[in-house]
Image: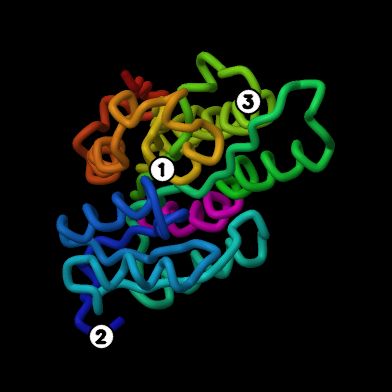
Amino acid sequence: MTDTNTPSTPVAVVTGAGSGIGAATARMLATRGFAVVLVGRRYEMLESVRESMQDPTRHLSISADVADSERAYEVIDRAVEAYGRLDALILAAGTAPKLSIEQTTEATLEEAFFVNTFGKAFPILRAWPVFKRQRAGRVVVVSTIGTLDPFPGFFAYAASKAAADSFVRSMKVEGKAIGVKAFAINPGAVETDMLRRNFPENVVPRSKALSPESVAEIVVACATGQRDEDNGRVIPVPSS
């Protein structure tokens, strides 16, 4: 990152930015003039995405597991320290264990809820005082249509994402007084590595899956104020 950023440059933190929807969102935000803080567990993947973005020196990669509260708080602190503000928080990091109810273990539940629920809550908690000080901010949670219609095997996954959907409704209520808006994007099958770990192409053909970019377009529309009428809502994005 260079010192070419000004206090008026909008800033977004994107978790899960190393691939899939998070990476597509980071690239699109860059074309909208945002300085983007890319967050994920694998630094080399973040850097590969950053280098592919418009004006790559404007952006910053931070390797962190946001399911760890200290690391999540550090991400927000570093973003604000580097850029002086935070306009959008995009929470796209996730995990999708696919196990039947009888196969689900305590470890499965802990992983799903720490990554998909606490991994979204922790950055929100740290960003909230920043938004309050600014009297503005937008949070976009990347969830799943499975919270509305869970697929077999998504006992833990769908529940952990449903909790994150609830965060959005709460943020609408508490954010009204301080100018914060929040959105949940709930796509069906998206063509990502995570999808393919659970569903081979003979089960979910590529032609039936959404592209990461098509979902990112909705995420960016929410992050940039184009869909403020959906504040506090779950936005289903079904696949074919």
On screen, residue 190 above or below 84? above
Answer whether residue 133 is magenta in the image.
yes
> How far across and how far down the image is residue 203, in percent?
46, 23
188 lies left or right of 99: left
Q: Residue at x 36, y 49 (%)?
A: 137
Q: Nearer the viewer, residue 31 or 12?
A: 31
* Pointer 3 or 1: first along the chain: 3
Prevailing secondary structure of the magenta residues? helix
Q: Residue at x 27, y 73 (%)?
A: 51
> How far across and how far down the image is residue 160, in percent?
63, 33
Farthest front residue in view: 202
State which mark lies toward you, 3 or 1.
1
Mark 3 → mark 1, Cα distance in angstroms: 17 Å
68 lies left or right of 2: right
Q: What residue did someone put label 1 on? A: 192
On screen, residue 50 above or below 183? below
* Pointer 3 or 2: first along the chain: 2
Q: What residue did someone put label 2 on? A: 3
- Mark 1 is surrounded, within 10 Å at the Cα level, by few (under 14), some (14 to 19) or many (20 or more) other residues, namely some
The quarter of the image holding the N terminus is bottom left
- In the figure, residue 111 lies in which quadrant? top right
- Mark 2 is surrounded, within 10 Å at the Cα level, by few (under 14), some (14 to 19) or many (20 or more) other residues, namely few
Q: Amino acid at mark 1?
A: Thr
- Res. 154 mark: 3
> How far across and how far down the image is residue 61, in percent?
41, 72
Q: Is residue 232 visible?
A: no
- In the figure, residue 35 lies in which quadrant? bottom left
Describe the element under mark 2 as helix, strand or loop.
loop
Describe the element under mark 1 as helix, strand or loop.
loop
